[in-house]
Image (cartoon, rainbow, N blue to C red):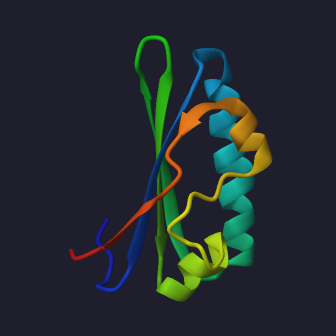
Amino acid sequence: MAYCRGVIARVWRGWTEPSDADEYEAFVTETVFADARGEIPSLVDFEVWRRDAGDEVAFVTVARFESWDGVEAFAGEEYESAHVPDRAAALLSRYESTVTHYEVRG
């Protein structure tokens, strides 16, 4: 899938216990990003990547926004900090406190 220049990708990682992985994945895809899609028109799309890693499950979320304004609408003024709703935090065993942003170039 190709995106136009200027699209901003927001990348973040978190980990769950195996027993919480399905519930976390459902919450992120069916609530967090589904709600954001309805509320933030500049959210282009999102992906949730999952990898079983033995005693934990790793997740990477990639959300693509049309602009920095869209990133801020999703995450607030402190958009380099992770946006982790309370329900997600309760399901995660650990997570990155910051996110990384990339300009999509191709």
Q: Residue at x 49, y 57 (%)?
A: 98
Task: List the single residue furthest toward the top.
Answer: 54
Task: List the single residue furthest toward the left.
Answer: 106
| Left or right of residue 63, residue 86 in this image | right
Q: Residue 96 placed where, x, y %?
A: 49, 46
Quadrant location of residue 16?
top right
Task: List the single residue furthest toward the right.
Answer: 87
Q: Residue at x 50, y 68 (%)?
A: 80
Q: Which residue is drawn at 57% across and 57% down?
A: 82
Q: In this picture, is 70 found above or below 60?
A: below
Q: In this picture, is 81 found above or below 104?
A: above
Q: Residue 73 placed where, x, y %?
A: 65, 80
Quarter the N terminus occupies: bottom left
Q: Residue 94 placed where, x, y %?
A: 56, 33
Q: Residue at x 29, y 71 (%)?
A: 2
Numbered label tally: 0
| Left or right of residue 105, residue 63 in this image | right
Q: Residue 43 placed where, x, y %?
A: 56, 74
